[in-house]
Image (spheres, grey):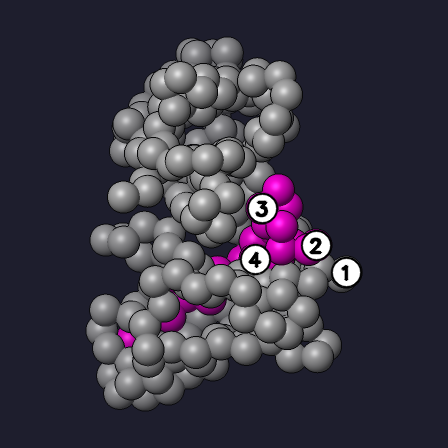
Amino acid sequence: AQSVSQHNHHVILSEAASLELGCNYSYGGTVNLFWYVQYPGQHLQLLLKYFSGDPLVKGIKGFEAEFIKSKFSFNLRKPSVQWSDTAEYFCAVISDSWGKLQFGAGTQVVVTP
Amino acid sequence: DSGVTQTPKHLITATGQRVTLRCSPRSGDLSVYWYQQSLDQGLQFLIQYYNGEERAKGNILERFSAQQFPDLHSELNLSSLELGDSALYFCASSEQGALTDTQYFGPGTRLTVL
């Protein structure tokens, strides 16, 4: 079955710590990959996306993600988090064989001052 | 602000009732998507419309239906409501509904079924 897995459901870290959130997918064919963020009480916002080309993608607010095709992974990173990065982060995948955006379960990130 | 609007923000109703959720896409976007977010199921794709026509279907129950009107706004109709339908319902829109399109999400409608 086609699926998107996010390794951590909850992450708690201190300001200035580095963040890495894992995302793996199981899809055949060509995939397009996204990371969305949902700040408390707000709508989902796109952080970054990968379609093709350089597998290291830079997004907004200092986030980046690396697509590793051989590992079916698209991990999100930020070198130094801020309190304002407290949010829920969703990995999402759309494949040409599936045609629909499939979200992972989300990772709740809490950054403590 | 994504430019996608949804009404109402909150809806409280009883089991067995029917409700309609409304979504207006960003200006110029032709495709609309509906998602359900619940604690146990996470974010689930329900249905997609492109320029008035149904394009893709996900895990949408038969009690649920949707349509996209000529002015491109969309409505999601939920009928014979059950307690388990309580969730946050998001609408998203994109330019062409292509796989590479970014989907812009609205603020959601929180449905509570009592």
Q: Are marks 2 and 3 in contact (CB under 8 Å)?
A: no
The answer to if B92 sits in the magenta stretch is: yes
- Circle 4 sits in a helix, a strand or a loop, which is it? strand
Q: Please tell me which residue is depicted at 57% across the width and 29% down the height of the picture.
A: A50
- Circle 2 sits in a helix, a strand or a loop, which is it? loop
- Circle 1 sits in a helix, a strand or a loop, which is it? loop
Q: Earlier in the sequence, mark 1 or mark 2?
A: 1
Q: Are marks 2 and 4 in contact (CB under 8 Å)?
A: no
Front of the two marks 2 and 3: 3
- The residues tagged by marks 2 and 3 sit, at their Cα atoms, a distance apart of 11 Å
- The residues tagged by marks 1 and 3 sit, at their Cα atoms, a distance apart of 17 Å
The answer to if B62 sits in the magenta stretch is: no
Q: Please tell me which residue is depicted at 58% across the width and 46% down the height of the picture.
A: B99
Type of amino acid at the residue the image marks with label 4: Ala
Q: Is residue B33 above or below residue A4?
A: below
**Position in image of residue A28 (x %, y %):** 40, 35
Type of amino acid at the residue the image marks with label 1: Gly
- In the rendered image, residues at marks 2 and 4 fall on the same chain: yes
Residue at image mark 4: B92
Q: Residues within 10 Å of mark 4 (few under 14, many from 20)?
A: many
Chain identity of mark 4:
B
Q: Is residue B47 above or below residue A112?
A: below
Residue at image mark 3: B99
In the image, the segment drawn in magenta is B88-113
- Nearest the viewer among A8 and A54 is A54
Residue at image mark 2: B95
- Nearest the viewer among B94 and B52 is B52
Q: Earlier in the sequence, mark 3 or mark 4?
A: 4
